[in-house]
Image (tube, grey):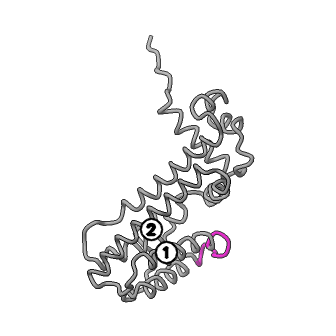
Amino acid sequence: MTTGKRPGAEERKPAILDALYAVIKQEGFENASIAKVAKKAGVHPSLIIHYFGTKERMVTALVDDVLRIYARLLETLPRTGSPEERLDHLLTLIWSRQWCRAASFSVLFSFLAVSRRNPEVAARVRRLFRRYREFLIVQLSAFSEAGVITAADPAGTADILISMSEGFHYFEQYHTPEEAFEEHRQGMIDAARKVLGAAPTEKRNGDSTEK
């Protein structure tokens, strides 16, 4: 007779965070009680308290998970190839379905709302945007040195691109029909190229990041 090993924290914590994500997506943050998350995860509420202590700490752990999703997306960008190709990949990624829908909009919105009253969540959201901004500054500086963009202020230009990409992210949730997504996405890429002072590219029917 063989006995199976009981799942430990390394197996249970991700399942609990997946359950929290699902409950927030379905019912909103305020309704995501420990009891509901425990039921969704198939564990006793006391186990969640044992692992995380409070709902707020559980939310903080979920924020960290979402941050890693976007970090992994940025890691998919090529580190080799011509500057023109790398610029094209960058703009294609941050205005892609994959980027916009990497995490549920309702979950992201809940994080932003919680960040207004939870310093730990606020610090993580700020860290996300700081890393995103720092990444763009490095990339834009390299593109400027290579002569593929003419924008002279990488930091200021990064701020504009973030505002454009985040605005697109939220706008498309409410105002862009699915059949118009590609046209709107390409329009944003064209606008970004104008901001950057980059040569325009031919319009495409899709991009490699959208599966």
For this orientation, the residue located farthest to the front is: 119
Q: Which residue is mark 2?
A: 133
Q: Main secondary structure of the magenta part?
A: helix
Dot 2 alpha-carbon crowd within 10 angstroms: few under 14, some 14 to 19, many 20 or more: many
Residue 185 place in picture, x, y as percent:
52, 77
Q: Is residue 27 left or right of residue 167?
A: right
Q: Which residues are magenta?
A: 172-180
Q: Split into 4 quadrants, where in the image is the N terminus?
A: top left
Q: Is residue 27 left or right of residue 203?
A: right
Q: Which residue is mark 1?
A: 159
Q: Residue at x 49, y 54 (%)?
A: 67
Give yes or no for residue 88 being in the magenta stretch. no
Residue 116 place in picture, x, y as percent:
66, 57
| Disc 2 element | helix
| Disc 1 element | helix
Q: Are marks 1 and 2 in contact (CB under 8 Å)?
A: yes
Q: Residue at x 40, y 70 (%)?
A: 136
Q: Residue at x 45, y 78 (%)?
A: 156
For this orientation, the residue located farthest to the top is: 1
The amino acid type, in three-letter code, at marker 1 is Asp
The amino acid type, in three-letter code, at marker 2 is Arg
**Whether residue 68 is situated above or below residue 9 in the rendered picture:** below
Residue 86 place in picture, x, y as percent:
32, 73
Dot 1 alpha-carbon crowd within 10 angstroms: few under 14, some 14 to 19, many 20 or more: some
Residue 90 appears in which quarter of the rendering?
Answer: bottom left
Give yes or no for residue 176 being in the magenta stretch. yes
Q: Nearer the viewer, residue 26 or 143?
A: 143
Circle number at residue 172: none
